[in-house]
Image (cartoon, coloured by chain):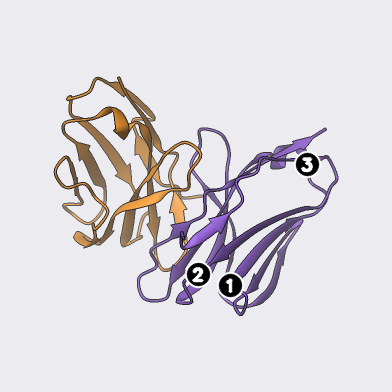
Amino acid sequence: QKEVEQDPGPLSVPEGAIVSLNCTYSNSAFQYFMWYRQYSRKGPELLMYTYSSGNKEDGRFTAQVDKSSKYISLFIRDSQPSDSATYLCAMSERSNYKLTFGKGTLLTVNP
Amino acid sequence: EAEVAQSPRYKITEKSQAVAFWCDPISGHATLYWYRQILGQGPELLVQFQDESVVDDSQLPKDRFSAERLKGVDSTLKIQPAELGDSAMYLCASSLMETQYFGPGTRLLVL
């Protein structure tokens, strides 16, 4: 079992849809949780960062962490074609900040 | 906005040749990371530096890969000799604390 599991998709939605992306993890030492967006042939771009259970909102994006279930989510409201990208969840321990990534979910938002 | 710089952006080489990648982190970031990302997968850590010291190189194939950060600023990752399986995106990231910022990556193709 990998430390971080993420459904690779692909996920295709119409413009304006609400998108839900999820990851599960097995390492209870993970304390920091991030979502990165990666456009084709580009480096990952930090989208959301959180370290506590609960919700964190930034514009159309909401990151949710449930440490008791070892489950994190990213919600995208009013999705736009420009949101089409691969979304990577990543997490790290407090001790070393080394990121462990999921495989990434490929999202396509159709106009 | 400060960014992580990487060069070259693309590299095509033949197997058994030597290749080198360069990274210039965000100014003031003491921690520098090199990741390898195979198509369809999340990035995997190769080596982590704190200033000029290696913190973690447990996943670096040391028979062919080497990395240095001599003055604690920019860094070089070298592969010698390159093998077909080394074809991937090589990403550099830097951080002050737990949030890592990635460069655009170097896409390597070994023929």
Q: Are marks 1 and 2 in contact (CB under 8 Å)?
A: yes
| SS for callout 1 | loop
Of labels 3 and 1, the one closer to you? 1
Residue assigned mark 3: A80
Residue at point 67%, 62% (across, down): A73
Residue at point 50%, 69% (across, down): A26
Furthest-front residue in this view? A1
Marking on residue A26: 2
| SS for callout 3 | loop
Same subunit, tags 3 and 2: yes
Q: Position of residue B56 (x, y in %)?
A: 25, 61
Q: Nearer the viewer, residue A104 or B100?
A: A104
Residue at mark 3: chain: A
| SS for callout 2 | loop
Residue assigned mark 1: A70
Of labels 3 and 2, the one closer to you? 2
Amino acid at dot 2: Ser
Furthest-bottom residue in this view? A68
Amino acid at dot 1: Lys
**B6 relative position to B74: left or right:** right
Residue at point 58%, 64% (across, down): A24
The chain that appears purple in the image is A
Pick the quarter of the image with the C terminus of chain A: top right
**B63 relative position to B35: left or right:** left
Q: Colour of chain B?
A: orange
Q: Position of residue B22 (x, y in %)?
A: 28, 39
Q: Are marks 3 and 1 in contact (CB under 8 Å)?
A: no
